[in-house]
Image: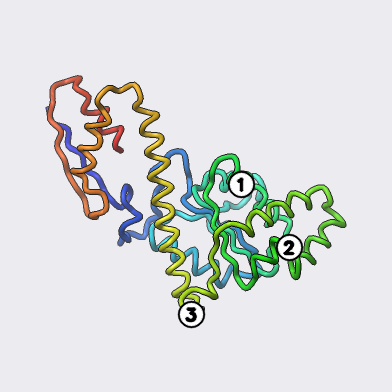
Amino acid sequence: MTVSILINFKQVNRLFQASSSQSRPVSPSTSWKYDVFISFRGEDTRKTFVDHLFLTLEDRQIYTYKDDEQLLRGELIGPSLFEAIQESRIAIIVFSQNYASSTWCLDELAYIMKNRDERRQTVIPIFYDVEPSELRKQKAYYGEALARHELKNRNKVESWREALVKAGNISRWDPRTVANGHEAKAIRSICEAIKQTLLKVMTCTEASAEVSANTDLIGVETRMQELKSFLKVGSGGVHMIGICGIWGSGKSTLVSSIY
C-alpha cells in the first residue's frame, strides 16, 4: 500500500515565501489562532504606522490580529480582545504618545505582560515617538496619563504601572533608529525580524508538542526526522512523497505526526 502526501508550503512553510493567493493564511497550529496580536492607540497610529505594519505582516503571510480587521460587529470588545491576546503567539505593543491615555490599552498591556509571565508569550515593544524611559520612569505623557487615571481607576493603576516598567525593560524596536528613520524601510526590517522570531517560536512550540504527542511511539522520532529531511522545509514549492508499507505499519501515524 502507498500513501501519497501532498504538502502545500504556503501553509506549512509560509514564513519562508510570499503567497500569490489573496486568501488569508491559516495558522497551522490548533493551539494558536493568530501569529501576532497588535496592541496600539488608534488615534495615534491606526491609519499610519500600524496600518503599514499590519499590511506588511500580512504580505509575509503572518496572520495578524488588529481590532478593526478581526473584531466582528456585535462582539464585546473586552472579552474578544483578551481572547485574541491569549490565542496569539506574539504580542506587539506599539507605544505612542497617547497609548497610556487609554484604559483599554493599559488593560491590554497588563494582560499581555501576564501572558508573558505565565504562558511565555513573546512580547515585542515598538516605541513610536516615545522613549523607553517614559515607561520605566512614568514621566511626560505617560506620567500625566497615569496621574489622571488615579482619580478614577486607583485600583488598576498599580498593575498598569508595573506592566509599563516591565515592558520598558524588554528588548525593543524604535523606528527612528532603523534605516535612518525611513518608516517604510524600518517597518520592512521590523517585520523581517518578527518573521524570524515567529519561526523560532513555532519551531520550539511544535517541537515540544511533537515530543509530547509521540512519547509512547517507539521509533517514530527517527522516522520523523528522516521524512523531514526529504521534505526540505524552506525550499518552497509543493512536494509529493510516497510512503510504502503493509497495513498497520504506522504510515498514517507518521504522516499525522509530521503534519
Q: Nearer the viewer, mark 3 or mark 2?
A: 2
Residue drawn at the location 22% of the way across and 48% of the way down: 232
**If the image is split into quadrants, where does the C terminus sit?**
top left
- Specify few, some or many for label 3: CA neighbours under 10 Å numbering under 14, 14-19, or 20 or more: few
Residue drawn at the location 13% of the way across and 22% of the way down: 246
Callout 1 secondary element: helix
The residue that mark 2 highlights is 137
The residue that mark 3 highlights is 180
Quadrant of the image occupied by residue 213: top left
Q: Amino acid at mark 2?
A: Lys
Q: Nearer the viewer, mark 2 or mark 1?
A: 2
x, y percentage for residue 240?
17, 44
Q: Look at the picture and state if 125 lies above or below 88.
A: below
x, y percentage for residue 69?
53, 58
- Mark 2 to mark 1: distance in Å? 31 Å
Question: How many dots with numbers?
Answer: 3
Q: Look at the picture and state if 42 lies above or below 221.
A: below
Seen as rendered, the residue at the extreme right is 151
Of mark 2 and mark 1, the one earlier in the sequence is 1
The residue that mark 1 highlights is 80
Of mark 3 and mark 2, the one earlier in the sequence is 2
- Mark 3 to mark 2: distance in Å? 27 Å
x, y percentage for residue 217?
30, 23
- Specify few, some or many for label 2: CA neighbours under 10 Å numbering under 14, 14-19, or 20 or more: some
Q: Look at the picture and state if 69 lies above or below 249.
A: below
Callout 2 secondary element: loop
